[in-house]
Each structure stands twice: as C-alpha cells, then as structure tokens.
Amino acid sequence: MEFADSAPILAGHLPYPLACRILHFTPKSVMDRHSSPWAELNFALSGMMEIGIGGVTYLSPPQYAIWIPPHVEHCCQNEGDVHYACIGVPAAACDGMPDKPCTLEISPVMRTILADFERRGIRYPATPEDRRMAQVVIDQIRQARAYASYLPSTSDTVLAPVLSALQRNPGDKRGATHWAATAGITERTLLRYCQQHLGMSFNEWRQRLRVVSALGLLDAGHSVQTVARDLGYSTPSAFIAMFQRLTGESPDSARKRGMQPVS
C-alpha cells in the first residue's frame, strides 16, 4: 500500500480568507490521522476519496465535499486515482458554517473559482480581486446544502460485510432477502439494522450508493446508457428518474459538467 505525504501545514498566522491545496493521490494511498487549526473542505476533482472521522467513513465523490471543522482529527484513503482540492478556512471565518463534520453540495460557482485558482497557482489569495473571489467561496460554503453523511457506513460486524459487498458491485440486483440470508439474519432484522446503524432504509442506502457510483462513472465520461446498465437498471429512463430525484439534475448534465477541464 502506498502512503501519501503527511498533511501540509497551513500558515495559520497569515490573514488570508482561505488556503487552496490541490492534491493528487495514486491508488491505495493513505494519509495518516491528523488535525488542523483551520477548517477543511475536501472534494474530489476526479475520483473518490474516503475520509475517516470519529469511526465514520465519509465518501467524497465528484460534486460533493466533506466539511471538517477546526481541530477535528481525520484520516484519508482511496482505492483509485484521486485528484482533489483541500480548502482551508481559518477558524475565525467559520461563523455560520457547520460545527460538525458533514457532506456539502458543491456549487458550480465554487468549482469555477477554485479551478481558476488552481490554473493560476493561487494558494493564498493575496490580491484584492482574488480575496473577493475567496470570499465568494466562503459564502458558498455557508449556503451549501448539508447532509450528515451522504452515504453512511458502520462497523457493525453483521451489516458492514453486506455494505462492503454492495460497494464492490453497486449494480447487484439481489434484494434484501438475499443479503439478509448471507448475513445469517432475517430480512426484518436487516432492515432494522439499517435504520439503527445508517439512519435510513436499506433501499435508500442502495440508491445513494448508485448515485455515488454513477457520479464517478459520469465524471469519467461514460455514457448515461452505459452507467445505467452497469448499475443494474433495465432501462436508462429508470436510472435517469432515480438520479434526477436524488440529485436534482439529469445524469447527462452531471456527465457534461464532469468532462469540463478543472484547470
């Protein structure tokens, strides 16, 4: 397993509204547990990052970010190649922002500004123009739609293997009855465990998994028809309806946005 460098230290004494780091991780990379006096907004420009916070694994697919308040310990790992942004926000600028780790939707405005910073190599916005754009990013974080965790996980010894198997093959069509049998429990118990440990139903978790998987595939340029087939949908229209209901946009729009250059 390949280990990433330890987290870069932010210059906390500098009076900038935020700090931008664009990081690249090769497959099977790991960043050891660490914390920062700054808050962090982590989101994938491509690929899928897994961030561990307090025993919970947060997934950071394209179009969604993980918000980590100041001084909260976390670690990172990834299965595949990941190119992602880490936006540091000074603690003094965190008023009105979530006080607990959560998942935030990323707006097109925020992505455009940060892509411009990346293109010009801006780490600490210093000019009046760049600081104004950085303030827009701060405002966008405050306004972003938040989720406790878009795709929650659990360390429960009965439920965790079921979720892991589904994550390896999100297009698996077999239902709750099959997965309960593999876990040696009744279907009713499986459904109860999902509500207890995940805070949602088995079917809702599976749909969110498919959305997360679809975002990665669409971001890589796969067609809507191919993604629908790979995720087990009998028709593209059924997949499109599910995706639009959960994300508020069509998969084709997500695919086209993901294919836009990030620098």
Image: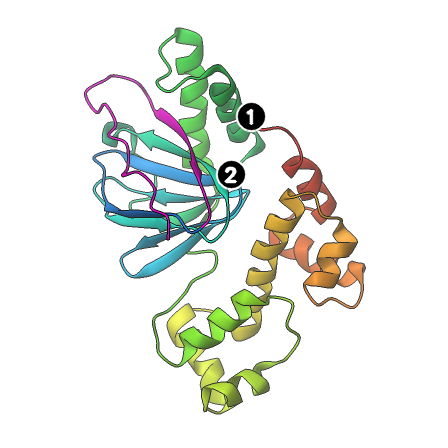
Residue 117 appears at what percent x and percent y?
Answer: 47, 20
Position of the C terminus, as image quadrant, is top right
Residue under pointer 2 = 106
Residue at left offset 30%, top offset 18%: 16
* Left or right, 106 with reference to 236: left
Q: What is the three-letter code of the residue carrying label 1?
A: Thr
> Does 241 lie within the magenta span?
no
What type of secondary structure mainly makes up the magenta span? loop
**Residue appearing at x 64%, y 38% in the figure:** 258
The percent position of residue 54, horizontal first and vertical second, equals: 27, 57
User: In this rendering, is residue 246 above or below 201?
Assistant: above
Q: Whole-percent x and y of residue 25?
A: 43, 41
Of residues 219 and 90, the one nearer the viewer is 219
Q: Is residue 194 above or below residue 114?
A: below
**Element at badge 2?**
loop
Q: Which residue is mark 1?
A: 112
**Which type of secondary structure does the marked residue at label 1 adopt?**
helix
Q: Residue at x 63, y 54 (%)?
A: 214
- Residue 153 vertical position relative to residue 173 in the rendered view, above or below: above
Image position of 262 (left or right of 56): right
Residue 25 shows in the view: yes
The amino acid type found where label 2 is placed reads Ile
Tell me: residue 37, above or below residue 169: above
171 left or right of 5? right
Q: Position of residue 84 (x, y in %)?
A: 46, 37
Q: Which residues are magenta?
A: 1-27
